[in-house]
Amino acid sequence: MPELLEQDLHSTFYPIYSAKNDYESKSCGIHIHPPNFLHNQISFAENPRDSGVKPIYTDGSKTDEGTGSAYCILENYGIIASWHGKLDHSNSVFQAGILAIKMAIEAASFLHRPIRISTDSLSSFMAILNPKSQHRMVREIQTLLLSHKHIHPRWLKDHVCYLGNECADQLAKEATTKDDPFFLPKTLSYLKSEIRSAALSVWQDNWDNGETGPSTHNIVPGVSNKRVGWNREKIMFVTGHGPFPSYLHRFNLRTHDNCSWGEEVDPIHYATKCRLPSPGISKLQQCHLN
């Protein structure tokens, strides 16, 4: 049995391990000296009508159909430039938001005028503000911003009906169904969910085909890593490990495993078949006394 379990684990987890380059990896250390950081370049202060500043709106979206990322530039209430890309369903909305900001910064780096890049993703904005961030794309954004002082990221409140935000959100949603996939490494949280799912699958297979615990399997056929919260009596009933003649007989603590009517006494017997009539003492106690 241990050998079979080892084979199951190897066949289940090896494909995940062999594809480790498909997942995000964290960067180490601080890559920007704190005094040189971007606090004067990034701000929560929002003035959507800054004179002479060209706004670029970014957004990421995740729906049942997939994950999308987009930015757009407006002029006279119309889109004059935009980009949108489809991500894999395993990518997160955080990754989509970060990607949109990075693509917008790269596009703005060729414009020789003040640029404001707006996002309503607070998690993305706070990650860019963190000099100790270990996220590779966040670090790339920080490096780009240091090299292009004319680009100023700004955070916008969500659901305030900024036209640019609404347009970027719509482009990101459309990208989930129209565009070709844009590759990004899968998140570590997705990796954890894959490992958890694979482990539960192996556990379920061994539980279904195991040679022990059939009484418990009949009541709890599905495995879970969540506690059931049963009390002592329920555990005794489900497992059959208690003062039942069938259990005591296994350890030679009774000469037989039958009750007074010749029936095998297990928990199901008490619940469905026991004919003891006395209301003053429990069926469990009466069968045990017999």
Image (tube, rainbow, N blue to C red):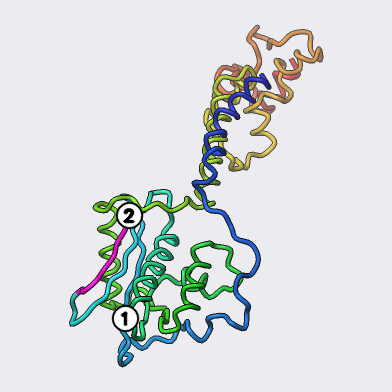
Q: Quadrant of residue 32?
A: bottom right
Q: Which residue is mark 2?
A: 86
Q: Residues within 10 Å of mark 1 (few under 14, many from 20)?
A: many
Q: Is residue 142 left or right of residue 235?
A: left
Q: Is residue 135 left or right of residue 251?
A: left
What is the span of residues highlighted in magenta in the rendered image? 79-86
Instruction: Locate residue 120, reporting x and y percent.
Output: 39, 73
| Badge 2 vs badge 1, beta-carbon distance below 8 Å | no
Q: Residue at x 42, y 82 (%)?
A: 152
Quadrant in which the N terminus is drawn: top right
Q: Main secondary structure of the magenta part?
A: strand
SS class of the residue under badge 1? strand
Distance between mark 2 and mark 1 Cα atoms: 23 Å
Q: Which residue type does callout 2 highlight? A: Lys
**Residue at the extreme bottom of the image, as rendered:** 51
Q: Quadrant of residue 266?
A: top right
Q: Residue at x 71, y 11 (%)?
A: 257
**The disc label shown at residue 204, or none:** none
Q: Which residue is mark 1?
A: 55
271 in the magenta segment? no
Q: Is residue 217 left or right of residue 239?
A: left
Query: Which one is earlier in the sequence, the residue at label 2 or at label 1?
Result: 1
The vertical placement of 28 against 112, above or below, is above
Q: Residues within 10 Å of mark 2 (few under 14, many from 20)?
A: many
Quadrant in which the C terminus is drawn: top right
Instruction: Locate residue 25, reporting x and y percent.
Output: 56, 54
Instruction: Locate residue 286, reporting x and y percent.
Output: 71, 21
Q: Is residue 193 left or right of residue 249?
A: left
The vertical placement of 236 against 105, above or below, is above
Q: Nearer the viewer, residue 290 or 279?
A: 290
Q: Quadrant of residue 102?
A: bottom left
